[in-house]
């Protein structure tokens, strides 16, 4: 029961994108295509899960004065692994995400959860937190990406949905489109919450 409550917390109640509004750099920068949003979300979720597990396991071995540098080193190890895997198996996506994958190291979602949760809780609770926050971030990026790609080019995951008749809205593929889409989604999430839907 506690596991599910912690998991739901990241998926909805404290969703990193729509509730806490952190990790905005990749949220706004890479969500112009659904595949980019999905891969970035899953890469972040993997790093979050792996680093929270390790930090929760070794938290008592890390001296207080080197806590943050130690967390960054652990996180950077998993980010490097993800970066190499993407370059090996998805070079096109790795190129599109370019510097945003290495920036996962300093993503406030990951550092924040390492400091606020994994360093104070059990491994099982840390797994629930990482899955909730990671999948919450992933679904938020995917939703934003699908909206932007559909409105911007009439496609989802590169598959033409709206056909040639659709007058593409190029602004949706630009940074302004990211801000517009995110603002509308934040307003919608707040409206849903105000109605008591969870």
Image (cartoon, rainbow, N blue to C red):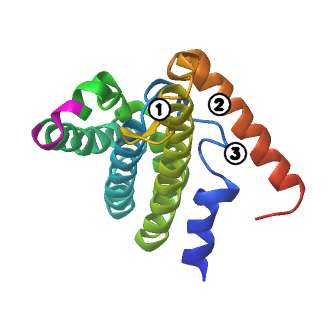
Q: Main secondary structure of the magenta part?
A: helix
Q: Residue furthest left?
A: 88
Disc 1 vs disc 3: Cβ atoms closer than 8 Å?
A: no
Sequence order check: which comes first, mark 2 or mark 1? 1
For the record, the magenta segment spans 88-92
Secondary structure, mark 2, is helix
Mark 2 and mark 1: Cα distance apart in space: 10 Å
**93 vs 142: above or below:** above
Q: Quadrant of the N terminus?
A: bottom right
Residue 181 circle label = 2
Sequence order check: which comes first, mark 1 or mark 3? 3
Q: Position of residue 126 (x, y in %)?
A: 46, 64
Q: Residue furthest front?
A: 165
Q: Is residue 194 left or right of 179 when viewed as pictured?
A: right
**In this view of the protein, which residue sits in the foreground, 181 or 135?**
181
Callout 2: few (<14), some (14-19), or many (20+) C-alpha neighbours within 10 Å?
some
Q: Residue furthest right?
A: 195
Residue tagged by mark 3?
19
Sequence order check: which comes first, mark 3 or mark 2? 3
* Residue 196 location, quadrant: bottom right
Disc 2 vs disc 1: Cβ atoms closer than 8 Å?
A: yes
Callout 1: few (<14), some (14-19), or many (20+) C-alpha neighbours within 10 Å?
many
Of tags 1 and 3, the one toward the viewer is 1
* Residue 176 location, quadrant: top right
Residue 31 circle label = 1
Q: Is residue 32 left or right of 81 when viewed as pictured?
A: right
Q: Quadrant of the C terminus?
A: bottom right
Q: Position of residue 114 (x, y in %)?
A: 45, 49
Q: Is residue 163 left or right of 87 when viewed as pictured?
A: right
């Amino acid at each position: 029961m506690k596991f599910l409550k912690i998991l739901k917390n990241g998926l909805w109640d404290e969703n990193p994108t729509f509730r806490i509004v952190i990790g905005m750099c990749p949220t706004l920068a890479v969500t112009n295509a659904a595949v980019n949003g999905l891969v970035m979300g899953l890469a972040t979720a993997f790093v979050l899960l792996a680093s929270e597990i390790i930090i929760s396991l070794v938290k008592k071995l890390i001296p207080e004065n080197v806590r943050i540098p130690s967390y960054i080193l652990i996180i950077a190890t998993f980010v490097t692994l993800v970066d190499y895997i993407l370059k090996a198996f998805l070079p096109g996506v790795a190129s599109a995400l370019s510097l945003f994958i290495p920036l996962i190291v300093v993503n406030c979602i990951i550092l924040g959860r390492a400091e606020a949760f994994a360093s104070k809780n059990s491994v099982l609770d840390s797994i629930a937190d990482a899955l909730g926050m990671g999948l919450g971030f992933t679904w938020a990026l995917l939703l934003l990406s699908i909206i932007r790609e559909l409105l911007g080019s009439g496609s989802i995951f590169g598959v033409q949905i709206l056909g040639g008749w659709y007058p593409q809205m190029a602004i949706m593929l630009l940074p302004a489109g990211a801000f517009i889409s995110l603002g509308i989604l934040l307003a919608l999430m707040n409206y849903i919450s105000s109605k008591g839907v969870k």
